[in-house]
């Protein structure tokens, strides 16, 4: 999980979209999901650079993930990006609404002849 968070944070477009997201300006009436609130807080702390390490317990708890065991990063990435895609779907910035699809294009079927 930590590696994926670092990769997403390193992506300037994704990082700016997370940090610039204002749930009060979001479209729709559903409240901002707690995992997204935790992600934004982690990104703020990463940006400040004041701590040598960060605690991700809030995000793990918000995602209702089991603790104390290794999780498959691919499965976690799918879950996390689906959640992010839903949250960004309400983003007032049209570019941010499609951010996850732009970062991870859908798989293409290939056929052999």
Image (cartoon, rainbow, N blue to C red):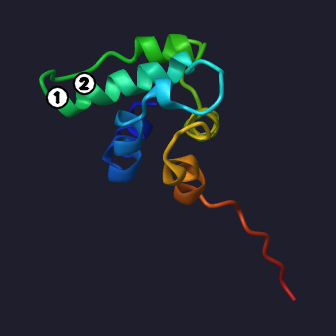
Label 2 secondary element: helix
Q: Residue at x 62, y 61 (%)?
A: 105
Which numbered tag is attached to residue 45?
2
Instruction: Provide residue 76's location: percent of width, then percent of height.
Output: 59, 33
Give yes or no for contact between labels 2 and 1 (Cβ–Cβ under 8 Å): yes
Please indicate whether residue 103 sits to the left or right of residue 109 in the image: left
Q: Nearer the viewer, residue 49 or 98?
A: 98
- Vertical relation: 81 (above or below) 103: above
Which numbered tag is attached to residue 108?
none
Instruction: Provide residue 58's location: percent of width, then percent of height.
Output: 43, 12
**Extreme residue toward the right, this view:** 113
Q: Residue at x 39, y 18 (%)?
A: 56
- Circle 1 sits on which residue? 48
Q: Is residue 68 visible from the viewing direction of this image?
A: no
Instruction: Provide residue 17's location: percent of width, then percent of height.
Output: 41, 42
Q: Residues within 10 Å of mark 1 (few under 14, many from 20)?
A: few
Q: Residue at x 45, y 20 (%)?
A: 37
Q: Nearer the viewer, residue 1 or 93?
A: 93
Q: Quadrant of the C terminus?
A: bottom right
Q: Residues within 10 Å of mark 2 (few under 14, many from 20)?
A: some
Q: Nearer the viewer, residue 89 or 71?
A: 89
- Vertical relation: 108 (above or below) 54: below
Residue 87 found in image quarter: top right
Residue 16 found in image quarter: top left
Please indicate whether residue 110 sits to the left or right of residue 96 in the image: right
Label 1 secondary element: helix
Q: CA distance from mark 2 to mark 1?
A: 5 Å
Instruction: Provide residue 8's location: percent of width, then percent of height.
Output: 40, 43
Q: Residue at x 59, y 36 (%)?
A: 90
Please indicate whether residue 31 sits to the left or right of residue 51 in the image: right
């Amino acid at each position: 999980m930590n590696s994926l968070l670092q990769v997403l944070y390193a992506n300037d477009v994704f990082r700016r979209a997370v940090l610039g997201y204002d749930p009060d300006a979001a479209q729709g009436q559903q409240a901002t999901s707690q995992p997204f609130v935790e992600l934004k807080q982690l990104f703020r702390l990463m940006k400040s650079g004041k701590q040598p390490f960060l605690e991700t317990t809030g995000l793990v708890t918000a995602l209702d993930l089991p603790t104390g065991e290794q999780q498959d990063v691919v499965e976690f990435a799918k879950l996390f990006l689906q959640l992010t895609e839903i949250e960004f779907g309400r983003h007032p910035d049209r570019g941010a609404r499609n951010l996850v699809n732009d970062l991870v294009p859908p798989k293409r079927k290939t056929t052999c002849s």
